[in-house]
Image (cartoon, rainbow, N blue to C red):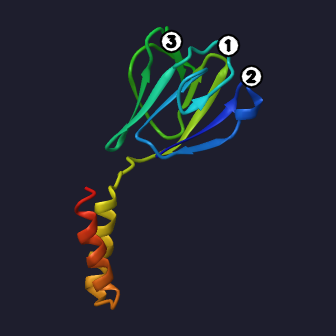
Amino acid sequence: MIEFEIIRSPDLDIQQKYSLYYNQIIIGRNRGHALIKDNQLLDSHLMLEVIENDLILHPQPGVSHYLLDGKRATNVRKIKVGQKITIGDTEFVIKDFKETVFKTKKMILDEKLAHLMEIDSPQLAIIEEIAEMMKDDV
């Protein structure tokens, strides 16, 4: 999950807080998860990536620089909560981030089954039948 707030932009429609439940997001003018109508941006301008406890900013090919807390930066950087990033005429603040764990249907079912076994639920037999049927789908 990456949470940020766009605080200044020529695209007034996007000035708000965003919570995106991905470990990687692309911000750009025409491609990505957050599309910003800012003529100074490239189609795909930067990528934010959560790796364990770190948030990494990757400028995309063709990006000459960006501002991190008002200071010029040109390469990959670790970002912290509260830092301001300026790309083109758009500025945003990192509000929060954490690695998003993706679970398969089988993982979710296994967790529910384990819980039902702990509480000795009468629904256990039904869940076991469903689990058996799902083995073929995985």
Query: How far from the left and from the top, in percent, is residue 70?
Result: 58, 21
Q: Amino acid at mark 2?
A: Pro
- Choose the circle earlier in sequence order: 3 or 1: 1
Q: Secondary structure at mark 1?
A: loop
Q: Are marks 3 and 1 in contact (CB under 8 Å)?
A: no
**Which residue occupies 26% across, 85% down?**
118
Which label number is shown at residue 39? 1
* Amino acid type of the residue tagged 3 in the rendering: His
Front residue of 25/31: it is 31
- Kind of residue indicated by mark 1: Asn
Whichever of labels 2 and 1 marks the residue nearer the N terminus, that label is 2
Q: Residue at x 62, y 16 (%)?
A: 88
The 10 Å Cα crowd at callout 2, few under 14, some 14 to 19, many 20 or more, is: some
Which label sits in the foreground, 3 or 1? 1
Q: Residue furthest right?
A: 12
Disc on the earlier residue, 2 or 3: 2
Query: Can you give x and y, in whole percent of width and height, for residue 62 in the image?
Result: 47, 8
What label sits on residue 131 in the rendered view? none
Report the quarter where the C terminus lies: bottom left
Residue at 65% x, 23% y is: 90
Q: How many marks?
A: 3
Residues under labels 3 and 1: Cα distance?
A: 15 Å
- SS at mark 3? loop
Image quadrant assignment for residue 84: top right
- Of 32 and 92, nearer the camera is 32
Q: Which mark is residue 10?
A: 2
Q: Closest to the observer: 55 or 138?
A: 138
Q: Are marks 2 and 1 in contact (CB under 8 Å)?
A: yes
Which residue position holds label 3?
A: 65
Instruction: Name which quarter of the figure residue 130 lies in.
Output: bottom left
